[in-house]
Amino acid sequence: MSKNFYITTTLPYVNADPHVGFALEIVQADALARWHALLGDTVFFNTGTDEHGVKIYRKAAEQGKDTQEYTDEYAEKFRALKEKLNLFADIHFIRTTDDHHKAAAQEFWRRCLSAGDIYKKNYQVKYCVGCELEKTDSELVEGKCPLHPTTEIELIDEENYFFKFSKYQKPLLELYEKNPTFVLPASRMNEIRAFVERGLEDFSVSRLKSKMPWGVPVPDDETQVMYVWFDALANYISTLGWPEDEKKFVAFWGTEENPNALQIAGKDNLRQQSAMWQAMLMSANLPSSKQILIHGFITSGGQKMSKSLGNVVNPVSIIDEYGTDALRFFLLRHIPTFEDGDFTMEQFARAYNADLANGLGNLVSRIMKMAATNLPGPVDISVSKTFTIEFTELLESYEIKHALDFVWAEIEDIDGEIARTEPFKLVKSDPEKGKEIIGTLVVRLYGVARLLAPFLPTTSEVIIDLVEKHKTPTTPIFPRKESAV
């Protein structure tokens, strides 16, 4: 039975060009969105850009640009990923500088304020601009943030508004108890539960406008702007037309009894997505998310890949050299879905040649050449239009890498069948048997193309077209490459 499916990524911060770490997250989300569309579900896929905060304000000032002009420029670079990564056609792209989003964030503030969960106080705290988060001494290593070791920790000493996070310790633990798979993988569920069990501290939700003017204005207080996380998290519901479009909100976000929102985020966003945001939703008397999927970091040669370390890989340059599906393939199969994974151009080029050029691409050429040469016309492919239970269960549990492993096991099995039966020889000595085997290989190849549709959509379409038109590819689907980018 078809249903509504809502999926969203975190919003990348527009203080640098898109990097391969965000490409990983968005193609994971895209694969799940495409899978549900194949099942006949109505999909709402949300992504966009996070455009407020001190990092952006300072970066624009460094470049001598108006802050809005700066964010417009970088937002377009992220929007261009829709075409470059061949993302789901109906993807919704939200910007936190959109007028509707800002109005929705202000309404969300008012609801938390009405619940008695926002108050004002003077405070002093250590703050990591890289994380846009307050830090305790126990979270720092030799006075530095372990995630942003080159960024100086700043001391904030001012009067701001705070959110009563401490009030929601018990409700959050009850949420986790009721939904033991609320956060995946289980190790991240254990991590956030332990964090909440240790006790929660109220967190700041505003900044002085005189010090940091780039943000959503706090309702009824011209001296303050919203803290970037409070504003940005609200995009998950503002993108649905909340608060005006209640029907759309309920249809895709869901209800307390039947939550529907699936969020994908990196492990550095675990606290914000699965604790802070859920407490904020409770405060505003709105349903919680359905699930939070947490992926790891992409490392490079075993070292964390980050802008501050200068070892970031530009996904656009890889796509320009190897093609979109080649990058999607490596990110989805060679990077573990829920854990850290390593990415070097040597690893990428090796996987491209072995799995795509010499593997899938060569298999398609061999089978379709045999079919075009020996079969009078297209074969009946109706028997290959359903998904296996094993493959379905893997994607229903969001095991994207293992689902692609399943596909490649089928590819290797088909290769083995060709080596064992040698239909290109058998068709000469026993034409009927040879043609029967070739026809079966074509059907299995069509099945592979169907399985590839969520992950390598262009490749899937090319193979399906070749099978349906009974044609041999005129050029290699994945030309062999002799060198890395």
Image (tube, rainbow, N blue to C red):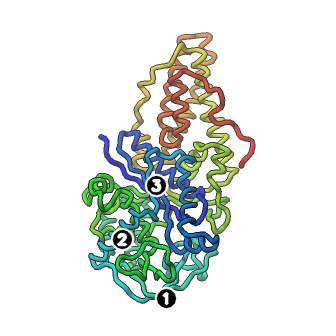
| Tag 2 secondary structure | helix
Of the numbered discs in the image, which one, if any, rests on residue 244? none
Name the secondary structure under disc 1.
strand
Residue at 49 percent across and 64 percent down: it is 50
Q: CA distance from mark 1 to mark 3?
A: 36 Å
Q: On residue 157, which mark appears?
A: 1
Residue appearing at x 36%, y 39% in the figure: 40
- Inspect the image, locate mark 1, and give the three-letter code of the amino acid beneath it: Asp
Q: Which residue is mark 2?
A: 106
> x, y percentage for residue 323?
62, 43
Amino acid type, label 3: Phe
Label whose residue precedes the other's in the sequence (1 or 3): 3
The residue positioned farthest toward the left in the image shown? 257
Could you say where residue 325 lies in the image, as x and y percent from the top left? Answer: 58, 42
Rendered view: 450 above or below 403: above
- Provide the residue designation for mark 3: 93
